[in-house]
């Protein structure tokens, strides 16, 4: 069997850099799994690529990061089964073919014994840097059970509970289970959850406000305590009202600058990469860093505005809602699929986790007995294409929402390895075709400098 090339050079394409599509070359090493700096490639006269990839005007993007993914191809991260580890490994190899090179396997509201059984399998998985294992877990996302019973969505109300002390958190997830968690979604207004947020942050767990009936004042208190994200903005939360905007009101918190407007879409490159495409909007960053920001994942601006997830499948949110949220704070937008285990399966009836039946019709998954929306089966590239179409933000801006934005939200240990094409970052890459208004298509996927799809 022929050994894979150690040094690969990508040329004649557009690279996603700093919110723009820029003509240039990229060198990667499969030995280190990292991107090689241009200076190293230039000054090391002996350095020659083992393989040259002619992009022919296509786009080279960092690998996609999905921070809310519940399963796929019939496998559910929330359901223990005897061959859980093997099915999880198979799912990772399937996910990477869609361009998702890293993600947070998400476990919805479950009984304590379920968390303690599945979480040890779902923790960070990239330590051995083996590209053959497919998509990499960056740690588990626990969506529940500390949610608002009034905003439970499809979560089982009988399992939802309150936390009034850290011992309640440990009793739910287990002390060992907490070590595998990277992000938690919870309702800050329930019990004493807001008081517990600093403890999550201290342990390196991102606190995301979600499935919540919080008022704006309650949401602001959560941000002050260390929350840095909102889970699937608009969905499963108090609706926006002109006197009580709820969680959505956080996007209007900045006082130092007006929201950046959504600009005209950027034309995707077609052939000769000689021009630079600009991002749809630019948000300035302050050099000032408060003591609080040093203790928690960095916010994209010196304000109370958090990162926020958007499900741009065309079903969960209207195009207008997506555009309003994105226009309010482009630098905080993160696209997620929130896809269920039925993604990748044919249409039909399937058993749901609580014994109910669901019906899959295309991308839509709904309860059989009442027709209520249960979820979707979309891929992240479909969400990217929808987002470009709904917001007219441009290709580069949409790609930032699945690369640098989620990496920055996850903070130290991720932002310094994933999400950009900077030197010494992990060589997780996606090659995309698509010009003008045409949909982007995943052509190649690379993990740690090795082509895997």
Image: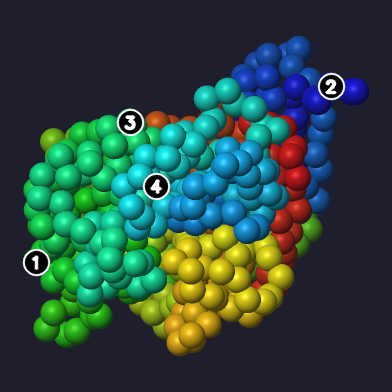
Q: Where in the figure is residue 249, as x and y percent of width and height?
A: 20, 71
**Label 2 belongs to which residue?**
3
**Label 1 belongs to which residue?**
217
Whole-number angstrom distance, CA of label 3 to CA of label 4 = 13 Å
Of marks 4 and 1, the one in the foreground: 4
Q: Is residue 423 above or below residue 265?
A: above
Q: In the orientation shown, which residue stands out farthest toward the right? A: 1
Which sits earlier in the primary sequence, circle 4 or circle 1? 4
Q: For the residue carrying disc 3, how many other residues have a C-alpha within 10 Å: few (<14), some (14-19), or many (20+)? A: few
Secondary structure under the numbered disc 3 in the rendered image: helix
**Label 4 belongs to which residue?**
114
**Label 3 belongs to which residue?**
176
Query: Looking at the image, do the residues carrying marks 1 and 2 touch, with CB atoms under 8 Å apart?
Result: no
Secondary structure under the numbered disc 2 in the rendered image: loop
| Residue 14 vs residue 171, the one in the foreground | 171
Quarter of the image for the N terminus: give it. Answer: top right
Q: Where in the figure is residue 230, as x and y percent of width and height?
A: 30, 60
Which sits earlier in the primary sequence, circle 2 or circle 3? 2
Residue drawn at x 34%, y 67% is 156
Q: Is residue 11 above or below residue 49?
A: below
Residue drawn at x 60%, y 26% is 129
Of marks 3 and 4, the one in the foreground: 4
Q: For the residue carrying disc 4, how many other residues have a C-alpha within 10 Å: few (<14), some (14-19), or many (20+)? A: some
Whole-number angstrom distance, CA of label 2 to CA of label 4 = 42 Å
Q: Where in the figure is residue 173, as x and y percent of width and height?
A: 30, 42
Which sits earlier in the primary sequence, circle 1 or circle 2? 2
Q: Quadrant of residue 316?
A: bottom left
Query: Looking at the image, do the residues carrying marks 3 and 1 touch, with CB atoms under 8 Å apart?
Result: no
């Amino acid at each position: 069997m022929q050994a894979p090339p150690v040094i690969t050079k990508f040329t004649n394409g557009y690279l996603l850099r700093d919110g723009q599509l820029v003509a240039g070359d990229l060198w990667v090493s499969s030995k280190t799994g990292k991107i090689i700096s241009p200076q190293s490639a230039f000054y090391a006269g002996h350095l020659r690529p083992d393989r040259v990839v002619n992009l022919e005007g296509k786009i080279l993007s960092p690998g996609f990061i999905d921070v809310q993914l519940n399963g796929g191809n019939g496998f559910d991260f929330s359901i223990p089964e005897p061959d859980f580890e093997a099915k999880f490994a198979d799912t990772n190899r399937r996910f990477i073919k869609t361009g998702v090179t890293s993600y947070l396997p998400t476990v919805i509201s479950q009984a304590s014994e379920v968390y303690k059984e599945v979480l040890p399998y779902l923790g960070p998985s990239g330590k051995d840097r083996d590209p053959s294992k497919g998509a990499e877990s960056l740690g588990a996302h626990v969506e529940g059970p500390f949610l608002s019973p009034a905003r439970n969505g499809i979560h089982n109300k009988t399992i939802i509970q309150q936390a009034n002390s850290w011992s309640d958190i440990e009793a739910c997830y287990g002390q060992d289970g907490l070590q595998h968690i990277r992000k938690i979604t919870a309702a800050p207004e329930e019990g004493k959850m807001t008081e517990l947020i600093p403890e999550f942050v201290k342990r390196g767990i991102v606190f995301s406000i979600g499935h919540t009936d919080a008022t704006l004042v309650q949401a602001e208190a959560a941000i002050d305590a260390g929350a840095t994200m909102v889970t699937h903005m608009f969905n499963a939360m108090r609706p926006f009202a002109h006197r009580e905007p709820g969680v959505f009101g956080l996007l209007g918190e900045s006082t130092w600058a007006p929201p950046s407007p959504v600009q005209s879409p950027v034309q995707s490159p077609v052939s000769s990469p000689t021009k630079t495409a600009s991002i749809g909007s630019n948000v300035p960053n302050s050099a000032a860093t408060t003591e609080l920001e040093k203790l928690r994942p960095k916010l994209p601006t010196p304000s109370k505005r958090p990162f926020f997830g958007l499900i741009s499948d065309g079903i969960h949110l209207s195009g207008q809602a997506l555009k309003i949220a994105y226009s309010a704070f482009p630098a905080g937008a993160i696209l997620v699929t929130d896809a269920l285990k039925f993604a990748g399966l044919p249409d039909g009836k399937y058993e749901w986790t609580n014994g109910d039946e669901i019906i899959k019709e295309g991308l839509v998954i709904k309860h059989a007995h009442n027709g209520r929306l249960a979820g979707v089966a979309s891929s992240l590239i479909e969400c990217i294409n929808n987002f470009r179409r709904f917001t007219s933000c441009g290709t580069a801006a949409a790609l930032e929402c699945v690369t640098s934005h989620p990496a920055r939200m996850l903070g130290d240990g991720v932002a310094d390895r994933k999400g950009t094409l900077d030197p010494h970052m992990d060589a997780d890459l996606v090659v995309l075709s698509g010009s003008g208004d045409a949909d982007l298509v995943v052509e190649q996927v690379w993990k740690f400098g090795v082509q895997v799809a």
